């Protein structure tokens, strides 16, 4: 069984408001189009309404690794691996998730990560054997088998309001 862990615990201080309220549902929609078996969202700084299962991480301020450890600890014993994605990456391609899963199934590596143009980004798959070694910086510092996703859209990483894709901006309206 493979779960997706969506990290959405941050304060969004650079954004100026809880960006998760705007970006989480588009991320979840894309994750659900992949081959993961289930999804858990890690919350922290902000309460959010979602139909996904959530876990509140009281240690979220310690960094993404703390949030990731909370999410992994909440997974059931039958979870073999977790695909980690960011709650502020609304352009995530479900095919990238499926590629890292397929690579993990073939290679049985403890960590598998997508790359775009040679840059390591999300999704990152963590086999259960890697869960105990998650540093506070998160999975980005762990050695990984890399999976080229150059033909796919990178997931994005929205930190500021002006980085929100036009299709998600509730404050913009189409031309009359």
Image: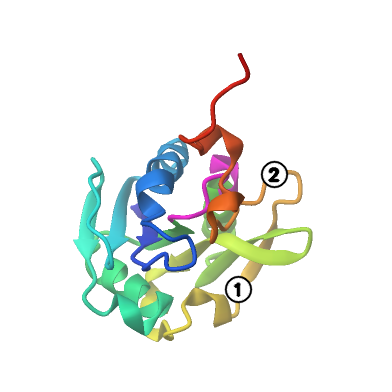
Q: Is residue 158 left or right of residue 52?
A: right
Depicted 60 relative to depicted 156: above or below: below
Query: Residue 81, relative to residue 136: is it above or below?
Result: above
Residue 174's label in the rendered image is: none
Q: Is residue 155 left or right of residue 71?
A: right
- In magenta segment, residue 175: no
Which of pointers 1 and 2 indicates the residue nearer the eye?
Answer: 2
Question: Circle 2 sits in a helix, a strand or a loop, which is it?
Answer: loop
What x and y, as percent, mark residue 123? 54, 58
Spatial CA span between label 1 and label 2: 19 Å
Badge 1: residue crowd in 10 Å (few <14, some 14–19, many ≥20): some
Identify the residue at horizontal 54%, vertical 41% (top origin).
Answer: 94
Where is the C terminus found, in terms of image quarters? top right
Residue 104 in which image quadrant: bottom right
Residue furthest out toward the top = 176
User: How far across and how far down the image is residue 43, in percent?
Assistant: 28, 62
Q: Which residue is mark 2?
A: 152
For residue 144, which numbered disc appears in the image?
A: 1
Determine the residue positioned at 56% across, 33% down: 167
Specify few, some or many for label 2: CA neighbours under 10 Å numbering under 14, 14-19, or 20 or more. some
Q: Is residue 160 left or right of residue 72?
A: right
Q: Is residue 53 left or right of residue 102?
A: left
Span highlighted in magenta in the image: 87-96
Q: Residue furthest right?
A: 117
Total count of labels: 2
Q: Which residue sits at x=44%, y=40%? A: 26
């Amino acid at each position: 069984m493979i779960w997706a862990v969506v990290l959405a615990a941050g304060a969004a201080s650079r954004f100026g408001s809880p960006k998760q309220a705007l970006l989480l549902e588009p991320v979840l929609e894309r994750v659900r189009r992949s081959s993961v078996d289930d999804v858990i969202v890690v919350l922290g700084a902000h309460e959010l309404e979602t139909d996904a299962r959530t876990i509140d991480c009281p240690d979220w301020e310690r960094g993404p690794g703390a949030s990731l450890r909370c999410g992994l600890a909440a997974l059931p014993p039958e979870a073999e691996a977790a695909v980690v994605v960011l709650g502020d990456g609304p352009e995530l391609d479900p095919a990238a998730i499926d590629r890292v899963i397929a690579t993990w199934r073939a290679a049985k590596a403890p960590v598998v990560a997508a790359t775009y143009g040679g840059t390591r980004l999300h999704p990152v798959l963590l086999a259960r054997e890697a869960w105990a070694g998650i540093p506070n910086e998160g999975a980005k510092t762990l050695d990984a088998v890399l999976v080229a996703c150059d033909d796919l859209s990178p997931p994005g990483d929205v930190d500021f309001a002006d980085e929100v894709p036009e299709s998600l901006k509730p404050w913009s309206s189409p031309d009359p």
